[in-house]
Image (cartoon, grey):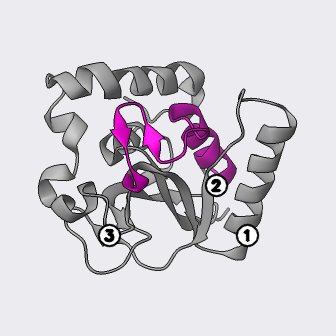
Amino acid sequence: MADAKKTVETATLGGGCFWCLEAVFEELEGVSSVESGYSGGSGTPNYQEVSGGDTGHAEVVQVVFDSSVTTFDEVLAVFFTIHDPTTLNRQGADVGTQYRSVIFYHSPEQKATARSIMDQLAEDKVYNKPVVTQLTSMEHFYPAESYHQDYYSRNRAQGYCRAVIDPKVQKFRQKFSSKRKSQ
C-alpha cells in the first residue's frame, strides 16, 4: 500500500508582530518550517525601515505545511484565533501598517478559502467589530534578519515573550491541543 501523498503548501500571514505568529505556527502539526519576514510593500526591506512604517511592508510569517496533515482552513483557524483581525493596522501596543492583519494568498484556492472563512466569521458574528484583514495576492517575501528567526524559542525569559507571546501560545495549546506537534 502506498503512503499518502504529501502535499506541500505555503501560507504567508501578517497579524502583528511576526514573533507571535512564528511561535504558534512552529507548534502546529504538519508545519515543516516557519520563517519571519516582510511582504506587501516596495523595495527590499530591513527591520529598521519596516518598523518605521514607511515601506508598506507588513511583518509576516511564511508557513510551509503538509496540507494532507493540516489544511489551509486549519492554518487560518489558528491565525484568526491568535490575533485580533478587527483592529486596523494594530495589534496591542504595536501600531502601524506594518502590523496589519493580512493574508497573502498563493493561489486562487487560497483566496477563495480565505474569503469564505472571513465571510463566515462575519455571518456568525464571531467578533463584535468587522474583520479588517486584507486579502492580497502574494508577490514577494523577504526573510527577516537572522536575529528575528526562532525569536521566542531563544528568548522565552524576555519580558515581551512572557507578556505578549506566552498568552498566544497558551491560547493555541488550549484551543488546538489535537493539532499540536508531538512534544
Which amino acid, by three-letter code, is at mark 1?
Glu
> Viewed as shown, does residue 8 lie left or right of 157?
right
Residue at mark 3: 55
| Depth order, front residue of 33/45 | 45
Residue at mark 1: 109
Numbered disc in front, either 3 or 2:
3
Query: Where residue 176 sits: x, y (%)?
Result: 57, 28
Gap between marks 1 and 3 measured at Cα: 28 Å
Image: 78 above or below 53: above
Gap between marks 2 and 1 measured at Cα: 10 Å
Circle 1 SS class = helix
Residue closest to the far right: 123
Residue at figure coordinates x 77%, y 39% from the top left? 121
- Residues at circles 2 and 1 in contact by the CB criterion of under 8 Å: yes
Circle 3 SS class = loop
Residue interval drawn in magenta: 71-98
| Depth order, front residue of 119/31 | 119
